[in-house]
Amino acid sequence: MEIRKATSNDIPELASLMEQLGYPTSVEQMRIRFSNIESNPSYHTLVAEYDGKVVGMIGLCTGVFYELDGSYVRIVALVVDSNYRSKGIGRKLIEEAESWAKRQGAISIGVNSGNRTERLTAHQFYINMGYEQKSIGFAKKLI
């Protein structure tokens, strides 16, 4: 297995992974999104290759604290292809994300995960990776 920086060649697989995460996404939509993400220096996308196939991704975003000195990294997307779960791929993606965050000088890394039944396994995964449940999130659509 290899963890590497995502490239535009990975767009079809990224679209498929977004579908599995529960967000229907065409290849063209992913092409536009990835172009916007890739051009923003606050974002970093990694993919996991297993047997030469992209089977997972993690999307990261850096920010600075208002309430503390320093910066943080947020995991804004994490998904492993359903056919490749329980092989340590998610763990490797998280570990590489944490290493990248440290290299950026971040003092913290966090993730939000939907409060839905289908996300309970993901919640347990984050707990197993040493993450603590610390807050309740709120969202509002503006369009």
Image (cartoon, rainbow, N blue to C red):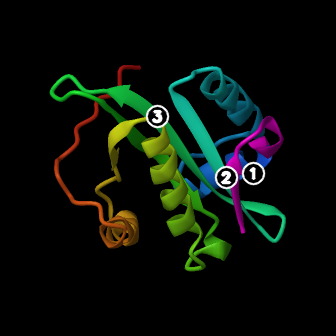
Q: Nearer the viewer, mark 2 or mark 1?
A: 2
Q: Please name whichever residue, 85 or 128, is drawn nearer the observer in this view of the structure.
A: 128
In 3D space, how far apart are the residues under numbered discs 2 and 1 (Cα atoms)? 10 Å
- Identified by mark 2, the residue type is Val
Cβ atoms at labels 2 and 1 below 8 Å apart: yes
The stretch in magenta equals 1-11
How crowded pointer 2 is (Cα within 10 Å; few <14, some 14-19, many 20+) is rated as many
Where residue 43 appears, as percent x and y from the top left, is: 54, 31
Sequence-wise, the earlier of marks 3 and 2 is: 2
Q: Which residue is mark 2?
A: 47
Q: Which quadrant holds the N terminus?
A: bottom right
Q: Is residue 77 magenta?
A: no
Mark 3 vs 1, N-terminal side: 1
Relative horizontal placement of residue 118, taking residue 28 as reference (left or right): left
Three-letter amino acid code at the position of disc 1? Glu
Could you say whether the residue bearing mark 2 is in a helix, strand or loop?
strand
Residue 39 is situated, as x and y percent measured from the top left of the image, at: 65, 20
Q: Which residue is mark 1?
A: 13
Residue at x 37% of width, y 38% of height: 106
Q: Indicate which disc, 2 or 1, sits on the residue closer to the N terminus.
A: 1
The quarter of the image holding the C terminus is top left
Query: Image check: 93 left or right of 53?
Result: left
Is 45 above or below relative to 55?
above
Hey, what amino acid is under mark 3? Answer: Cys
Report which residue position mark 3 lands on.
61
